[in-house]
Amino acid sequence: MRVLLLHNRYRAEGGEERAVRDTAALLSTRGHEIEVLERASADGSALDAARGLLRGGLQPEQVSAAVRRLRADVVHAHNLHPMLGWRALAAARAAGARTVLHLHNYRLFCAVAIAYRDGATCSRCSQRNTLPGLRLRCRGSLPEAAVYAAALSLQQPRLLAHADRCVTVSDATARHVAAGLGAAAPRIAVLANFVPAAGFAARSRADQGEYALVAGRLVEEKGFDTAITAATRAGVPLLVAGEGPDEARLRRLAGAADVRFTGRLAPEALAEVRAGAGVALAPSRWEEPCPYAVLDAMAAGVPVLVSDRGGLPETAGPGDALPADDAGAWASALEQLWQDPEARRVRGRQALEHARERFGEDRYLEALLEVYAGAV
């Protein structure tokens, strides 16, 4: 097929950027004709972002030209805010392509995309009612909160109207999106993220692991404080890989405990660190959809302990989910696993098998092409 991938890059690179990059590489290596059209929030000013949000996207003619140049069958859109918007989908359709809208988060109705605030899941904004986000200033300043409240309400129905198929990355996320959209919710296909073939270990070495690992952006909703508290209580060395605004608080919490902060690591360095872990933790408090930190750990043969929020339980498989805010339960589970290397080896092998079965590139490609076929 001929596929144009659309994405507005975030200011801080994350999983969605990887999803676009990995999808483009997979389709290209399997013989499909691919082009990626990206814009970056970091390249524009706050005024540019506001204009893009309120107008439903800027320069849609670039999308039309790319569709015609590629003779695209499908335009596969990821994040469209603020610079692409619904006009990008409309332009793609007008140029003769069908459209797939890939929902990695809750941006259709939530200004901060994670549907979380004040330490808990938030459903105040739903359907086209985005006034709670304005009242609470979820974007920080009042002007920016006002722009997002108005723009999301305006864009939501038009984005849905111009998407031939909608997909998201977990069943839990599909349910949360459907609840947030109410009667306007389209039929949503589930297409979990995948790990490229090169990312799978030959076998688990978790029994030889030297530390527990928690990796990702250091923000409050990721629950890394739970990981630090649990590891400290359990007497397990912890390695924290990542950077973010919560780092100073987490360092204070760790104090003199056996907790090491690595900062943000390049993919190769992170893979090396992951290979030395005996267990990986994902104690998120928000409805996290399908994090690569969990997929990559399982693909490396590392057993995972995850919270009971969002798509984490279905991603990790049965029996591995813990209450997000119960540090005592996390400490107990971590201590029990850490003191039994053979259990870590067995659970690491099971995690690797689970990842190969559910998150391999062949399965992803088959499901993705079915989505494209449904759109066409």
Image (cartoon, helix red, strand yellow):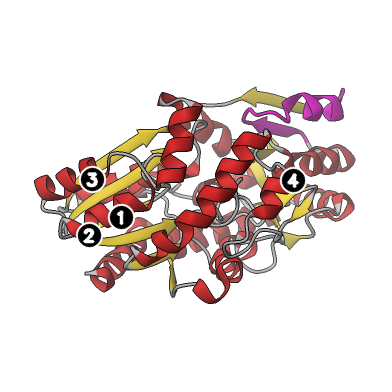
Q: Are marks 2 and 3 in contact (CB under 8 Å)?
A: no
Which of pointers 4 and 3 indicates the residue nearer the eye?
A: 4
Q: Is residue 283 left or right of residue 184?
A: right
N-terminal-most mark, 1 or 3 = 3
Label 3, on which residue?
63
The magenta region covers: 237-257
Verify CB contact (< 8 Å) between mark 1 and mark 2.
Answer: yes
What mark, if any, has residue 93 been given in the picture? 2
Residue 136 position within the rendered picture, expressed as x and y whole percent measured from the top left = 74, 45
Q: Secondary structure at mark 2?
A: helix
Cα distance in 3D space between marks 1 and 2: 6 Å
Name the residue that disc number 1 marks.
89
Measured as percent of width and height from the top left, residue 27 is found at 24, 52
Q: Is residue 245 magenta?
A: yes
Residue 288 percent across, percent down from the top left: 62, 54
Label 4 to label 3: alpha-carbon separation = 35 Å
Three-letter amino acid code at the position of disc 2: Arg
Local SS, label 3 = helix
- Label of residue 131 in the image: none
Q: Are marks 1 and 4 in contact (CB under 8 Å)?
A: no
**Which residue type does callout 3 highlight?**
Val
In the rendering, which numbered label is found on residue 136?
4
Q: Taking the image as drawn, is residue 286 in sight?
A: no
> In the figure, 343 relative to 221: above or below?
below
Could you say whether the residue bearing mark 4 is in a helix, strand or loop? loop
Identify residue type, mark 4.
Leu
Q: CA distance from mark 2 to mark 4?
A: 37 Å
Q: Amino acid at mark 1?
A: Leu
Q: Earlier in the sequence, mark 1 or mark 4?
A: 1
Above or below, 208 relative to 333: above
Q: Out of 254 and 372, give the one closest to the viewer.
A: 372
